[in-house]
Image (spheres, rainbow, N blue to C red):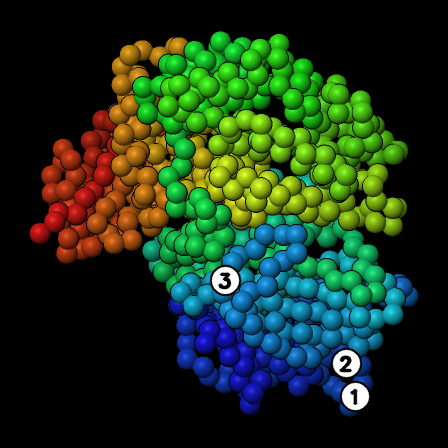
Amino acid sequence: MSIRFHEEHKTFYLTGKESSYIFSLNEQGFLTHLHYGKRIAEADLRYLMQGIDFANSPSVEDCQPSLNAIPQEYALYGRGDYRSPSILIKTQSGSRLTEFRYQSYQIVKEKPAIKGMPSLRGGETLIVTLYDKINGLELDLYYTIYEEQSAVARRAVLKNKGTAPVSILKISSFSIDFARNDFDLISLPGEWAGEREIERQPLRRGIFEASSLRGHTSHQYNPFFALCDKSANEDLGECYGFNLAYSGSFTMKAESVSHGFTRVNGGINEVDFAWKLDVGEEFESPEAILVYSEKGLNKLSQNFHDLYREYFINPNFVFKKRPVLLNNWESTYFDFTEKTLCDLIEKAKDTGIDTFVLDDGWFGKRNDDWAGLGDWTVNTDKLKGGLKTVIEKCKECGMKFGLWFEPEMVNENSDLHRAHPDWHIASPDLESCRGRHQWTLDFANPEVVEYIKGVMSDCLEQNEISYVKWDMNRPMTEFYSKALPSDRQEETAHRYILGVYELAEYLTKKFPRVFFEGCAGGGGRFDPAMLYYFPQIWTSDNSDATARTYIQYGTSLCYPLSSMSGHVSICPNHQTGRVTPIQSRMDIASFCATGYELNLHALQKEDFDKISEHIRFYNGIHELILRGDLYRLRSPFEGNYFSQMVVSKDKKKALFVMMKMMAKANDCYPFIKLKGLDGNTEYEIAGMGTFRGDVLMNVGLRFPKNLLDFETRCFVLNAVEK
C-alpha cells in the first residue's frame, strides 16, 4: 500500500517511489507535518513535536502548543497562528475564525475527479476529514500518491453542513510547513514574448509570492516554483516543486517568518475572491501537484514530465506523433484570399509538412483586429468557396487542415456584440477597457458558453478539421458579470475559468479525433490544467530561435518537451528583428512539437531542401520528444551556450543540441559533458565517430571555438548493437 495510517502513532504515511510524506494528529486534533522528502521506513516521528512553545490558548486547562510554532498540514486563521492561512471563512456573524479539527479518514483506490476542473488521473487517495463544530463546516483534504512516482497531488473540499450560509474568502489547494528555511527559491517569471525565465534567489525572511490577478495564469508568473538546497544544481541536491493545476487568477506563496519554518501554500488568488456557500453546498479547490527529487533539478523536471505524460495529458494524443504544420500567420497576417492560401499549400506539398493551419482572419468581417471576433462564420469575401475549397486543396496535396479560434473574445464591431451587448465582462459603473481592440466574453454566464459550444461545434461538424488552435489574447480587466447577483460578484473570475473548462471538456469529448493546441498571446496560459485538454501549447509568440532557448529552457523545468509548440519562423524575426541561420531555427524547433511559420514564396530552393531534410530528421527523433528523459546541460541564463539532450528510456538513442549565443575573438574550445547515457554502451554519432557512454559523460565533447553568432550543433546518438 502507498498510504497507511498507524493507529498507535496517529500518523499517516504516504509513500512514493523515492519519497515519503508523513503527518500526524496532535492531542488537540490538529494535523502536524512531520516529513516530506527522501523515502524512509515507517517510524514514530512525533518526537519532532517535543518542546514546542505554548501560548494563546482558550483556557488554562486546555493549554495547547501555539499554532504559530507547529508545522501544520492546513493552516487556520488566527488562534495564535500569524502566518498566511490556508483557509479563511466569513460567517453570518461576521467572524472569520474557524477551528477545523480531525474527525476521520478514508483511503480510496480510485481517485475521485474534481467537478468541473481537470486533475491527475489514477493514484491511491487519502481523504482526511476535519470538522469545525461551531459553524458546522466539514473540510476534506485530499492526498493522492503514485507508487511509481515521487509526487503528491493535493486539494481541499469545503462542505457547509451548518444552518446558515458562509462566505469563502480564501481556500488553498495545499499548504505545507517545512521545519527549515535554508532554501533557494526558483520561479518562472516573464512577460509577453519572454515567458518563463528562470530566476533563482535565496529564500529570505518575509513572503515570496508568484501570482496572477489577470483572470488567467499570465505571461508574468507561471503557477510553479521550487524550493531547493542552496547547493543544489541540475544533478545534485534536494528539490521540491509545486505546480498548481489551475488556469485562472492564482497565488503561490513561500513564507519564512518565525521558528525557522517555511510555509508554502497556493490556490485561487484570494484578492477579489469570495464564494457564497449555502447550506448543503460544497466547494472544491483546484489540484496542486507536489514533486520531490533528491538528485537535483534535472530529476525534478523528469519526475514532473513523467507524471504529466502518464496521468495528466490527454491519453489519446500524449504519445501520438504530433502534426508537423505550416501556419500562415506570419506569412500573410490578415491579408489573404482563397488563392493565397492554396498557393501556400501547393508550395508546401512536397516538403513533408502534413498539416496546414489557417490562423486569424478567416471569419466575419475580420480584415484587421478591430472587427469580427465572435462571428464564427466564414468570410466569403476572402474565401469565396468557404473553408471547403482550402480543405480540398490540403487533401489534394496530402495534408490535413487546422483552424484558429479565439472563442473567449468579442470585438465591439461584431454581429455577436450587436445582438448581445451584455455578453462581455463589463462593470456597470465604468467604461470597459479594451485590449487588442477586444473585450472578454462573460464565460461566467452559462448562456454565453452554450452559444460558443454551438457555433464551434457547427464549424467542426461541417468541415474536415483535424487541428484547432485555441487562442486567448487579452487578460480580464473588469471582473464583473451581469449574470451574477451583487453578492456573488467576487465569484466572477473563478466562474469564468470554470466556463472555459466546460467548453474545452465539451469540445474535446465531442471531437476526440481533433487535436487541440492551446495559446494565450503565446505562453500566457501554460499550466497543467490546460494540458489536460490541449496536449501542446504555443510556448511563446516569440519564435526567434535564440530567444526560444531561454523560453524553452525555463518551461522545461516543469513541463515536458512534447507540451511545447515551436515553429521555424521567418527572418528577420518579427518579434526581435534578429537574423539566425535557418539550420539553427530548425535545431531549436526540434526540441519541441515542431512546425513552420514561413512565407514559402520568399524561400530559395535550397531552403525547401533544408525543410524536407529537417522534417525527415524530426520524424526520426519524434519519439524522443514524446517519451524521452530531458537533461539540461548548459543554461543560456548563465553563460554563452545553450545545450540540452533527451535520452530514450532504454538509453539506446539520444538527441543533442547546443547553440553558441555570441561569437568571441580567440574564444575557448567549449567542452560539454553529456548526461543520461549508459556508461558501458558505445554510441555512434554520425560524422564524429563512436564513443563510450562514460567518456561522453565524464570527459565530454569538444566543439569548435569559432562558431558564429547563434550557430548550433544538433545530432543523434545511437547505441552500437553488439
Residue 8 on image: x %, y %? 55, 90
Q: Residues within 10 Å of mark 3 (few under 14, many from 20)?
A: some
The quadrant where residue 364 appears: top right
| In the image: residue 18, left or right of residue 717 | right
Label 1 close to label 2 by CB (< 8 Å)? yes
Within the image, what quadrant is residue 421 found in? top right
CA separation in Å, label 2 and label 3: 42 Å
Label 1 neighbourhood size at 10 Å, few (<14), some (14-19), many (20+)? Answer: few
Q: What residue did someone put label 1 on? A: 60
Q: Position of residue 576 (x, y in %)?
A: 47, 22
Can residue 636 be seen here? The reply is no
In the foreground, 94 or 360: 360
**Which amino acid, by three-letter code, is at mark 1?**
Val
The structure residue drawn at horizontal position 66% and vertical position 45%, both measured from the top left corner, is 502
Pointer 2 residue:
57
Which residue is disc 3 drawn over? Answer: 122
Q: Is residue 85 above or below residue 315?
A: below
Q: Amino acid at mark 3?
A: Gly
- x 55%, y 19%: residue: 387
Q: Type of residue at label 2? A: Ser
Closer to the chain start, of discs 2 and 3, is 2
- Element under disc 2: loop
**Real-space CA distance between mark 1 and mark 2, rounded to the nearest whole angstrom:** 7 Å
Mark 1 residue element: loop
Q: Position of 213 compared to 471: left or right?
A: right
Taking depth in this image into account, of 436 and 425 the one nearest to the observer is 425
Residue in the picture at 78% in, 59% down: 168
Q: Which residue does the image show at 20% across and 42% down from the upper left?
A: 717
Q: Nearer the viewer, mark 1 or mark 3?
A: 3
Q: Secondary structure at mark 3?
A: loop
